[in-house]
Amino acid sequence: MSIILKEKEDFKFGFELFDDFYGMCFFLSEKGLIIKSNKSTEKYLLKTEDELKNTSFFDIFSDENKEKIEKFFFKSISEKKSQNLSTTLTTNNKTWNFNLLFSPYFSNNHGTPKHCFANVRDITEKKQLEKDFLQFYSIAENTVNPLQITNLDGEMIYVNPAFVKVSGYLKEELLGQNPRIFGSKKHPEKFWKNMWKTISAGNVWSGEIENKKKDGTPFYTQLLISPILDNDGKVTSYFGIHRDITEKKMLEKQLIHTQKMESMGTLAAGVAHEVGNPLASISALVQVVLRSTTDDFAKEKLSLVRSQVGRISKIIRDLVDFSRPSTYELQLTDINKQLEGAIDIIEVGTKNKEIEFIINLEENIPKLLLVADQIQQVFINILLNAVDSILDNPNKNKPKQITVSSSIDDENVNIVLSDTGIGILEEDLEKIFEPFYTTKKEGRGTGLGLWVSYGIVKSLQGELMVESKRDIGTKFFITLPTQT
Ligand SMILES: Nc1ncnc2c1ncn2[C@@H]1O[C@H](COP(=O)(O)OP(=O)(O)OP(=O)(O)O)[C@@H](O)[C@H]1O
Ligand SMILES: [Mg+2]
């Protein structure tokens, strides 16, 4: 601030310039006495210019600030430098936030300042805004709700820590990116078009969306986007607030899956009963006729019928296994022994197929009360699939390995069976436990193996889960509670 006035001149004319100046303006003597003040001063201090004249500038401040401001003033004079300070001023029971500027004024560069210009600017509103902003910022940073602000080009300009956490990305990886990077591609184009139409028109949009984390796993949120408007009502950016509903979605999915499996079990029991009885009659009749005929042609054809009936019976037995509590006897069973037994059976069938079995069984696993044949059937079904998937892998150079491990924790015996086979597509993962779902050629698979296994494990209050990556391999996890 430079003031083009001559020393000793009456400042009256020049100082009128400051009457419309924002905030209070003063001309002070080098001792800090008020020589002149502008019009705004009266509004704040409720004193006329005449009343203020020749009083100490520092007296307009409360005692706790006075000393500090005085020091500051003399520092400004002695260093011949402008100084800025934030302070408060209480008049008429109201406290204002002020920005105080001292600007010493001297006639020549070597002289000591004889006067000082002081500007006291009201920053109460600015301070309040700052405070509000800080409050909101701290809420945004600490809330568990993921938040994002996107500019008009659709680039993220702010994300809060909750957002960073749920997305699995680093903050730096997110800023400047389009939220499309979370796209699960599960929503039709129309869904997003509608969203853009709504928010660009200045309206609030909300919807449930499926997103994809950095590692590819899904996360589900209820998203609400509201446009941020400027003073003219123009959209400047978009504010998105998410509510994480991943857990709810997962539970929903699990429930639907469990219910589906249950209803299929009921259906299977019905079918097994309705088909099983007539089939038993057919089988018996075929036996009778076979024994009583001498006609070679009839004998040959009847043998064929018998083997086909046998095939159907096997399926029916599987259905019954799944849907009816086993009539086999429960006995304390050594899980490792059953695993070894299953591997032996599979190994016999895979001789010369170069599959390596890696076996990692933890000792001291307590015996579990279950039907040994059933649990071995589960292991065999999973291992047969593993062999099939390794043999189906067109990449012949890939290691052909099946790894079997067992372990124990506080509540469960855990069994993991993994293979280096062809893997399962993500969209097929939820279908593999359904009955008759198979990708195998006719005659090679009926699609009941995993369904039956699922039923058996569930009947033991256990869990059967799968993880798979196409071309990498598949892992089945079985957990069986140690106390049932
Ligand atoms: N380890 C695995 N690797 C790759 N795909 C698998 C694996 N296990 C199962 N699958 C897939 O899941 C489908 C269903 O398996 P499931 O064992 O229920 O039936 P299946 O093997 O086709 O017939 P079945 O077991 O009745 O003879 C398989 O056809 C296959 O596509
Ligand atoms: Mg199978």
Image (cartoon, grey):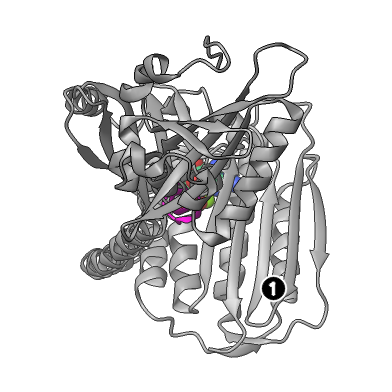
Does residue 434 appear in this view? no
Q: Quadrant of residue 225?
A: top left
- The answer to whether the residue bearing label 1 lies less than 8 angstroms from the nearest atom of ligand 2 is no
Q: Quadrant of residue 261?
A: bottom left
Side of 42 where 465 appears, left or right = right
Q: How many labels were placed on the picture? A: 1
Judge whether residue 169 is colored magenta: no
Front position in the image: 190 or 371: 190
* Label 1 Cα crowd, 10 Å radius (few <14 / some 14-19 / many 20+): many
Q: Amino acid at mark 1?
A: Gln
Does residue 71 appear in this view? yes
Residue 6 percent location from the top left of the image: 55, 11
**What residue lies at 32% left-to-right and 24% top-to-bottom?**
19
Where's the N terminus, which quadrant? top right
Front position in the image: 320 or 293: 320
Q: Secondary structure at mark 1?
A: helix
From the viewer's perspective, is residue 467 above or below residue 199?
below
Residue 213 percent location from the top left of the image: 52, 40
Side of 382 where 74 appears, left or right = right
Image: magenta residue range: 137-146
**What residue lies at 58% left-to-right and 28% top-to-bottom?**
116
Residue 438 percent location from the top left of the image: 43, 43
Most common secondary structure along the magenta stretch: helix
**What residue lies at 38% left-to-right and 47% top-to-bottom?**
128
From the viewer's perspective, is residue 355 above or below residue 181?
below
Q: Quadrant of residue 108?
A: top right
Residue 206 percent location from the top left of the image: 23, 41
**Mark 1 lies on residue:** 338
